[in-house]
Amino acid sequence: MTTRRNFLRLVGSTAAGGVISQYGTEIARAFEQVAEGDMEVVWFQGQSCTGCTISTLQAQYPTLEEALNEFRLEVTFHPTIMPEAGEAAIESMSMSPDILIVEGSIPTDIPEAATIGGRTAEDWVTDLAPQSDIIVSVGNCAAFGGWPAAENKKRLYDLGENVTGAKGLQFEKRKKGGVLGADFTGGAGLPVVNLGGCPPNPDYVLLTLATVLNGHVPELDEYNRPLPFYEPLVHDNCMHRGYFDRGEFADKPGGEGCLLKQGCKGPYTHCDDQTRLWNDGTSVCLNVSAPCIGCMEPGFWDRFSPFQQEMEGSPVLGNVSATQAGAVGVAAAAAGIGAHLGRRAMGYGKFESAEKADAETKAAEEDTE
Ligand code: SF4
Ligand code: SF4
């Protein structure tokens, strides 16, 4: 096993802020550097659907299997893919792993809602994380609470919101804190690295591991997500952007045109999936005219549901609704309205009004939490 001292030397040996964002020789070199012994990995699951595991299993160049077998990553625990079960599985788990990966949210009001080996997920995670060098939240649930933390707006089954008290490791939706607390850092000195998404792109998982193993300290955004993956705005790289700029909107999901009126959350969602694509570079939601539902963002689910409804009065459109914009249609582009909307959208997060609306949303969320 790589010692903590060796690992820290590895992490500190190259320039800060760099992130491996593409496959190639770098990723192979990253894993090959782990030459002094196997890196022990624990992949833990809380309240999860296992979708993040399924997504990671679809990774290419290398596949997850190649990464594990050829690059000396020893997964000592993974409830879904390990052959052992019961006590044997628990006994094989490293209690001070080099890398702790968590999938699924952690229930804190009803801790028994997620248990492994008779212990609650909360107990496991609060024990394991301080003993781990690198901690990675894979998926929106582990990073921000995900759908288990949702409001239950319709009060189905007469239940309140976030019934189990689901939290992410270091965030509750967009608020810092979570199960480990806002100031937590792992043995390598990093906070929990959040890979938002429901699920995240499999590249994000392996490339993040490659980045830290290659000695880089990844530059993170305000939600602790690696910047190169989560800085691009979906709306900026969407194949339907021309329709948006011309004010041409689809009248149904799958229809021709920009999907904003069908509830597309691309103007509010950050990730590089429009250029990276999924399934070995085959496609992405918007390329088959499925509206973006904002799954990469903290606050996904509540912030973006109902998914099929446009976000009226949102910063991207100011006082102009997509319905109004759509009614104007192509003529809007000639009048410059399309371009105006385009500029507003591209400036998401930069315009004062957008920042104000964002701050108000955040404050409202904090009031209700
Ligand atoms: S983030 Fe999505 S895919 Fe991953 S465990 Fe949660 S619900 Fe499943
Ligand atoms: S609103 Fe959605 S469909 Fe329209 S251009 Fe933006 S990301 Fe694409």
Image (cartoon, rainbow, N blue to C red):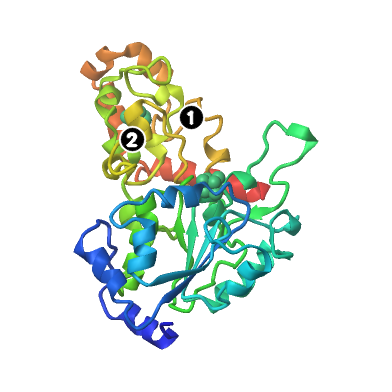
As drawn, 23 above or below 26 = above
The one nearer the camera, 55 or 253, is 55
Residue sitting nearer the eye, 356 or 204: 204
Residue 311 image label: 1
Q: How many marks?
A: 2
- Decide which of 329, 170 is in the foreground and name it: 170
Residue identified by numbered label 2: 345
Direction front: furthest residue: 83
Name the residue located 33 percent from the left edge and 13 percent from the top edge.
Answer: 328
Question: Going from the N terminus, do you reach mark 2 or mark 1 first?
Answer: 1
Crowding at dot 2, Cα within 10 Å, few <14 / some 14-19 / many 20+, comes out as: many
Report whether 284 appears left or right of 141.
left
Residue occupying the point 36% across, 25% down: 289
**On the rendered image, what quadrant is the N terminus found in?**
bottom left
In the image, residue 360 lies at what x, y percent?
53, 44
Residue 267 drawn at (x, y percent): 38, 36
Q: Identify the amino acid type marked 2.
A: Ala
User: Pointer 2 and pointer 1: residues touching (CB < 8 Å)?
Assistant: no
Please determine whether, in this image, residue 324 is positioned above or below residue 82: above
| Ligand 2 is within 8 Å of the C-beta of the residue at disc 2 | yes
Of 263 and 210, which appears nearest the observer?
210
Q: Residue furthest right?
A: 158
Q: The residue under label 1 is which amino acid type?
A: Met
Look at the numbered disc 2 and give the secondary structure of its residue.
helix
Which percent across, then down, holds residue 131?
55, 78
Q: Which secondary structure lies at badge 1? A: loop
Q: Which mark is residue 171?
A: none
